[in-house]
Amino acid sequence: MDSIVGLVGRDDVVADLVAEIRKGKHVILTGTVGIGKSAVLRKALTQVSSKIGLIIQLHDYQAKGQFVEMAKQMLYLGLVSAKELDLPVQFHDMAPAAIEWKEIRNRVNRMSMRDLTQAVIPALAKAETKPVIAVDDLTSLTPTQMAFWLAIFDHAQVVGCASEKKPRVKKLWWKMKEITIKPLPPEVVKDMVKRYVSSKGILIESPDQYISHVVKQSGGIPQAIFDMLEESSKERILDKRKVREMRHDAGIKYLDFTPMVMLLGALIVSMRYIGMGTGDKTLYIMGGMGAALFLTFKFFIFKGVGR
Ligand SMILES: Nc1ncnc2c1ncn2[C@@H]1O[C@H](COP(=O)(O)OP(=O)(O)OP(=O)(O)O)[C@@H](O)[C@H]1O
Ligand SMILES: [Mg+2]
């Protein structure tokens, strides 16, 4: 969506990221799914590219796919030769564009992570300027891939995104400076909605109601805002009723049952004491039974609520 309305309200984060990259730090951008990590990274890379010679961008989520992308870009950048990468002989004197990467991918899929590491690390190590490797998503990294990445960290600068820092690869997170991206504040969301609506020419019966609805329902998450705007742009005219029917999961807060369960418990216990005090035997017995049942089920109730 940043291609339609521009990257809104992220100048500070982009500047922070650019500064850390220039300092030579490994950086991890964190924040919930759809918050705009990839968009911020893209923007920052356009700002540093003139100062930093080599940027390798990886978009694949799979370890081996990431490796192939890396090898390919290193070959294009002249960091490594086909021979050093251990590619089949027929590719050795070929221009990178002529190489059949699909075939290489199949070959790579059969190689071990260790062999792959040994193929790229020496090439990264001998580069004159430390290459910057931007990996769009590191969320699903596994411990097997971690060794590969730890080796890369010594010879390149890694900048990446993750919607969650999985503890199983925390050794990587320790080496990275974290920049957390937060939801967009309401004024920024308003601005974004206005820009989108005017660029798409959607007719809205009550624009203020529409905007405040999007602000509330999206929780300031750009992907959620985008989903809602896209849905709206399918309508020719948005009247008030349609706006009221709009919902997005990102902004809906789930009801917390805990206080209600506590209150129920207190009520049952007090029934017993009131029964005792007033001599009302029925109330006393009911309160006692209720308390016993409550205690038995409380465990299960809280287990359910906590999920
Ligand atoms: N500040 C912004 N202004 C305008 N559009 C934005 C902004 N931030 C994000 N977007 C748009 O919102 C969508 C989601 O952003 P993006 O893909 O960068 O999120 P993400 O955090 O990388 O998500 P994921 O965790 O799924 O990878 C994209 O279409 C992007 O263009
Ligand atoms: Mg992303």
Image (tube, rainbow, N blue to C red):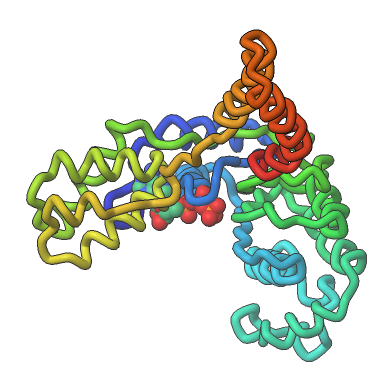
Residue furthest toward the top? 277
* Count of residue discs: 0
At 21% from the left and 42% from the top, the residue drawn is: 211
Residue furthest toward the bottom? 90
Q: Is residue 269 left or right of residue 122?
A: left
Q: Quadrant of residue 217?
A: top left
Q: Is residue 213 left or right of residue 137?
A: left
Q: Quadrant of the N terminus?
A: bottom left
Position of residue 229 measured from the top left corner of the image (x, y, whole percent)? 27, 55
At 62% from the left and 20% from the top, the residue drawn is: 271
Q: Is residue 289 visible?
A: yes
Q: Quadrant of the C terminus?
A: top right
Q: Is residue 13 left or right of residue 238?
A: right
Position of residue 90 measured from the top left corner of the image (x, y, whole percent)? 78, 91
Residues 174 and 50: in front is 174
At 39% from the left and 47% from the top, the residue drawn is: 222
Residues 202 and 275: in front is 275
Q: Is residue 207 above or below residue 279?
A: below
Q: Is residue 24 above or below residue 194?
A: above
Q: Is residue 204 above or below residue 209?
A: below
Q: Quadrant of residue 245?
A: bottom left
Q: Is residue 50 visible?
A: no
At 65% from the left and 26% from the top, the residue drawn is: 282
